Image (tube, grey):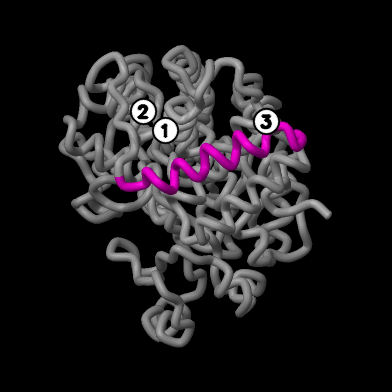
């Protein structure tokens, strides 16, 4: 019988060696269980802290670390993570990881695994301190991020705020939950009191959101299944508020899949409005179609198409509002997307900026005169945010910026009028959005 740690090992192998994404490499199950939660936490936690765990493995291994078998290294990462970052009893971790090593690699490595884990237990309060090639590299190792990423954040935010950002990215994520109905929004505090979920609280920013470190209680009450609640981060919800969808409006949601913002906008435009969700990925569009059907939202329509290849008349008459939730590096959501920090590079950010420019120019054609275009990302990087807006406005004089201050709290609006959330300030995902109006 395969243990949960063996399952985690195989998923981590698929993520690291096969390029799979966290969660997507796992076979779906009919319902979420405590086992699923522990498995997900182990996989995400080891992925987040991979660089720090590797540093410790290299320090404790008495040999050339480069010769350590990849599977054994992953087993050691898992054991170190459980010993240092979970409440699992030390003896249980050692026994389970030794059994995992025996089953997956062979008896020949059990002594090695046992020795390193027991040394970790002895030295928990005096672990090695990384020196790196300098103070920034040492900080990046200790907080398990690529050095280039830490360097650019220190340059922009300073060391103290960067450390706070790194710590946020390494925490178990806190989830946003949106209350869909006016009745549920009005009784938000009563719902939380009735649920009695530790770690759940009202959003300080938006009246239709709550926060929770646990989702299972809401699923057990079937509040998500019946459409009363939907899982959506507050920061992402803020992008929809910057859009300010109104009843009866026609809205084009570019790069819409998997559809969280499209569903939120559909709730706001009502049955007299239209949300056209467009994406080039057919399987992801199906997710939006399925969710809209489940929630009985016929005002949501979809198209599978590459926006860069569309004619100006592709979608009929121009739209009241257009949202471009652009593909990006995702460096604002590293708490939830633990693997992204190891997949992204400065070169990829440059490539994404070119794609973002092309998509902005494409979707601008579908905004009616006097209409609204909102550009949004879930990254912190100016090359994908402010720089893209500046370049777009240089090419498109028909658009002007409108401040987001009328739609979201002032604490989330910067001096230029852009909507921007920072994990180390707002304790939610890092998101950026700009509202622009097309001249008449």
Residue matched to label 3: 71
- 59 versus 404 height, above or below: above
Viewer-closest of 430 and 82: 82
Q: Which residues are magenta?
A: 105-125
- Give the crowd class for mark 1: few <14, some 14-19, many >=20 residues within 10 Å: many
Q: Quadrant of the C terminus?
A: top left
Q: Position of residue 91 (x, y in %)?
A: 55, 57
Q: Quadrant of the N terminus?
A: bottom right
Q: Earlier in the sequence, mark 2 or mark 3?
A: 3
Q: Label 2 vs label 3: CA separation?
A: 21 Å
Q: Position of residue 136 (x, y in %)?
A: 26, 22
Q: Quadrant of residue 196?
A: bottom left
Viewer-closest of 45 and 355: 45
Q: Position of residue 377 (x, y in %)?
A: 43, 35
Residue matched to label 2: 141
Viewer-closest of 254 and 366: 254
Q: Is residue 1 left or right of residue 142?
A: right
Assess whether mark 1 and mark 2 are in contact (beta carbons under 8 angstroms).
yes
Asked if the stretch drawn in magenta spans residue 267, the answer is no
Q: Label 3 vs label 1: CA separation?
A: 17 Å
Viewer-closest of 115 and 135: 115
- Give the crowd class for mark 2: few <14, some 14-19, many >=20 residues within 10 Å: many
Which residue is at 69% across, 42% downward?
24
Which residue is at 53% across, 46% downward?
251
Asked if the stretch drawn in magenta spans residue 117, the answer is yes
Which residue is at 40% across, 24% downward?
146
Q: Earlier in the sequence, mark 2 or mark 1?
A: 1
Secondary structure mostly seen in magenta is: helix
- 406 versus 383 height, above or below: below
Q: Earlier in the sequence, mark 3 or mark 1?
A: 1
Residue matched to label 1: 52
Assess whether mark 3 and mark 2 are in contact (beta carbons under 8 angstroms).
no
């Amino acid at each position: 019988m395969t243990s949960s740690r063996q399952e985690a090992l195989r998923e981590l192998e698929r993520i690291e060696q096969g390029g799979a994404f966290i969660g997507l490499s796992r076979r779906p199950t009919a319902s979420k269980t405590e086992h699923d939660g522990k498995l997900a936490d182990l996989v995400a936690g080891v992925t987040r802290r991979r660089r720090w765990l590797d540093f410790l493995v290299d320090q404790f291994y008495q040999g050339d670390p480069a010769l350590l078998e990849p599977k054994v290294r992953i087993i050691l990462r898992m054991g170190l993570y459980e010993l240092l970052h979970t409440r699992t009893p030390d003896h249980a971790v050692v026994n389970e990881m030794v059994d995992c090593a025996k089953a997956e690699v062979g008896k020949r490595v059990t002594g090695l695994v046992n020795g390193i884990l027991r040394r970790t237990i002895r030295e928990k309060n005096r672990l090695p301190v990384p020196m790196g090639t300098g103070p920034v590299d040492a900080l990046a190792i200790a907080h398990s991020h690529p050095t280039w990423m830490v360097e650019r954040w220190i340059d922009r935010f300073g060391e103290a705020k960067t450390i706070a950002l790194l710590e946020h990215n390494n925490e178990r994520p806190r989830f946003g939950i949106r209350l869909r109905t006016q009745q549920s929004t009005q009784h938000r505090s009563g719902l939380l009191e009735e649920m009695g979920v530790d770690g759940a609280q009202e959003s300080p920013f938006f009246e239709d959101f709550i926060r929770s470190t646990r989702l299972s209680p809401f699923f057990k009450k079937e509040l998500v299944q019946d459409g009363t609640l939907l899982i959506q981060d507050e920061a992402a919800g803020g992008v929809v508020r910057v859009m300010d969808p109104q009843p009866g409006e026609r809205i084009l949601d570019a790069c819409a899949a998997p559809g969280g913002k499209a569903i939120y906008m559909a709730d706001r435009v009502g049955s007299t409005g239209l949300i056209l969700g467009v994406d080039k990925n057919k399987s992801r569009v199906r997710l939006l179609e399925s969710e809209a059907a489940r929630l009985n939202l016929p005002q949501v329509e979809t198209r599978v198409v590459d926006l860069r290849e569309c004619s100006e008349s592709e979608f009929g008459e121009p739209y009241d509002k257009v949202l471009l939730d652009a593909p990006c590096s995702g460096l604002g959501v590293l708490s939830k997307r633990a693997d992204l920090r190891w997949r992204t590079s400065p070169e990829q950010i440059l490539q994404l900026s070119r794609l973002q420019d092309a998509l902005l120019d494409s979707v601008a054609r579908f905004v009616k005169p006097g209409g609204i275009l909102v550009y949004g990302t879930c990254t912190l990087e100016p090359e994908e945010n402010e720089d893209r807006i500046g370049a777009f406005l240089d090419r498109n004089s028909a658009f002007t910026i409108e401040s987001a201050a009328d739609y979201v709290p002032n604490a989330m609006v910067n001096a230029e009028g852009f909507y921007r959330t920072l994990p180390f300030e707002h304790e939610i995902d890092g998101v950026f959005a700009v509202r622009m109006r097309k001249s008449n």
